[in-house]
Image: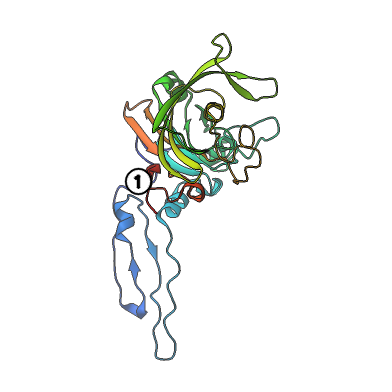
Amino acid sequence: MSDTGPGEPVGSADGMCRSDEQGMQGRRTFSPTSWEASGGGLCFTRPAPLRTEAAPATPDPPPITKDAMEHSSRPGARHLPSNLRIIHEDRDIIVVDKPAGMLTMASDTEKTRTAYFALTDYVRKGNSKSRNRIFIVHRLDRETSGLVLFAKTEEAKRVLQERWPDTTKTYAAVVHGLMGKPSGLAISHLVESGVHKVYATRDTSQGKLARTAWAVVQERGNFTLLDIELLTGRKHQIRVQMADLGHPVAGDRKYGVKGDTFPRLALHAKSITFTHPFSGQVMTLSAQVPSVFAQLVGRIGPGGAGSEG
């Protein structure tokens, strides 16, 4: 278990690193102040380039990104896949940005290449005898990228799931076609067939009620970027309801347009708002919309907002 308290991100530092400069033998020790201010608590040393009349100075290496440094500085980070990024971690919860193509939890055919397996290894720091555990609160489809919330204790899981109806989840989706109006609400009942495929029906005696709110963010050509809020949480809900409206999600091999060649499902869980299970703090966490979506709708601003150009 982490020693940090509820709501306190792992990796924060109690103090700041000092900067020193030494003139001895042309070397210096320094600490980038921008990293100190972020709470990274990291210090690095690097020899200054030697400058002589005979040889030009050696160029500095490419800068290390702040995200990469924070990822590598976490205890147990070497046991975490580089494409599974931790957005927030404290004593009770972990929120990650899951890549498309990774399962949330094991299936009959895939046991290890999952977010659950990777995070279990992470909290155990590779020690199979460790008693540290991860608990699944909810899941995303394999093809969907974005935020997934895990609990570190069974009690945290119980509290989060009890409060799940009050949790707000928003998605970014690129769909085929133009919507014809700025926003709308999709309401239908969803039924799962025997081949693990879901379909929509207006027959209220069948399936489960599903409600999805959507709003247009930007359009380009025959594609639209939508901001989507799940008002219920059904299997494949967004994918099925968008297809039922005549606007399937780009890259959807199950419910989408035949011949669609977009390399992945253009659906991303971009934000989640929930109450922390023990501190009671209302938390909103977000993950940047994948840059590949811009191939369809143009440049996307921070948080999924439309951007000119």
User: Where is 167 relative to 217, above or below?
Assistant: above
Q: Is residue 254 left or right of residue 130?
A: right
User: Where is 186 relative to 114, above or below?
Assistant: above
Q: Is residue 239 left or right of residue 68?
A: right
Q: Residue at x 35, y 79 (%)?
A: 26
Number of on-image labels: 1
Q: Residue at x 67, y 35 (%)?
A: 110
In the rendering, at what x and y percent does residue 90 appear? 40, 36
Is residue 197 at all visible to an observer of this figure?
Answer: yes
Q: Nearer the viewer, residue 212 or 149?
A: 212
Looking at the rendering, which quadrant does residue 121 occupy?
A: top right
In the rendering, at what x and y percent does residue 289 appear? 45, 44
Which quadrant is home to the C terminus?
bottom left
Q: Nearer the viewer, residue 260 or 266?
A: 260
Q: What colouring style does the render use?
A: rainbow
Is residue 3 at all visible to an observer of this figure?
Answer: no
In the rendering, at what x and y percent does residue 205 appear? 56, 8
In the rendering, at what x and y percent does residue 83 appear? 53, 47
Mark 1: few/some/many CA within 10 Å (<14, 14-19, 20+): some
Residue type at tag 1: Ser
Q: Nearer the viewer, residue 26 or 270?
A: 270
Q: Residue furthest front?
A: 180
Looking at the rendering, which quadrant does residue 243 occupy?
A: top right
| Secondary structure at numbered mark 1 | loop
User: Where is 54 relative to 296, above or below?
Assistant: below
Mark 1 — residue? 12
